[in-house]
Image (cartoon, rainbow, N blue to C red):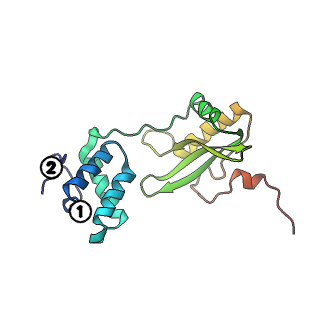
Amino acid sequence: MTHPQTPAGAHTSGWWAYLDERTCREVDADVLRDRRLSAVRSVWEALRPLGVGLHEAERVVHARYEALGDRVQHTLPDPLDLPSLAARAATLPGRVAAVEALWDGDTVHDWFVVLVAVLDAPAGEGHLATVYQRPGVAPPGDAAAKAGRTLASHLGVPFHFASPDIPDNDAPRWRAVQRPTEGP
């Protein structure tokens, strides 16, 4: 069965042939718009009755990225320059008490760093940027630390990155470090 938008001779996963044409069109549309998670979900839901797991669904989508190549409209990374981050922080609903970088990860992007503004009144946090590993640029920990320090200095608040060199999504958060140890 020939599926839409499959270039002649393009590499695809063997599971691609088991998808109906509607699902193939949806997956390719998601891949072309760089909506990887949505594409993986569609493949996984369609092939799960055949015993296909999430990891194999990711391989199918990865093969589609390769097959569609330069036609994919890759999402631009979040800007890390001071004017962009300061503008984003200015739109948050509270006073920025600190800038914090924390590791996170998933099966699609591996490890990445999230840069957040820790807020007072109302307490909470606001997303500033997500820094993924990209070829030819500084590692996400280095890039996030540099941008976070620059923004924190600009705002006159502390910068916190509990584990800048080693991905650790259980590292202590800024608020936890700021609280005095409670006695008995």
| Horizontal side of residue 58 vs 122, given as left or right | left
Picture quadrant where residue 155 is located: top right
- Residue furthest top as drawn: 83
Asked if marks 2 and 1 touch (Cβ < 8 Å), the reply is: no
Image coordinates for residue 131, horizontal then vertical, percent = 52, 43
> Which residue is pictured at 40% across the width and 39% down the height?
75
Report the front residue among 9 and 125. 125
Q: Residue furthest right?
A: 184
Type of amino acid at the residue the image marks with label 2: Gly
* Percent position of residue 66, x then y: 27, 48
Say if 91 sits above or below 169 in the image.
Answer: above
- SS for callout 2: loop
Where on the picture, by quarter, is residue 85?
top right
Q: Mark on residue 4?
A: none
Residue of label 2: 9
- Name the disc covering residue 15, or none: 1
User: Which of the pair 140/42 is nearer the observer?
Assistant: 42
Percent of width and height locating residue 135: 42, 42
Q: Residue at x 37, y 64 (%)?
A: 54
Say left or right for 157 vs 18.
right
Residue 148 in picture, x, y percent from top left:
63, 39
Observer-nearest of 37 and 114: 37
Amino acid type at circle 1 is Trp
| Vertical position of residue 117 compared to residue 110: above or below | above
* Residue depicted at 48% across the width and 45% down the height: 132
Give the residue drawn at x 47%, y 57%. 106
Residues under labels 2 and 1: Cα distance?
A: 16 Å
Task: State which quarter of the image contains the N terminus.
Answer: bottom left
Local secondary structure at mark 1: helix
Tell me: 21 left or right of 180. left
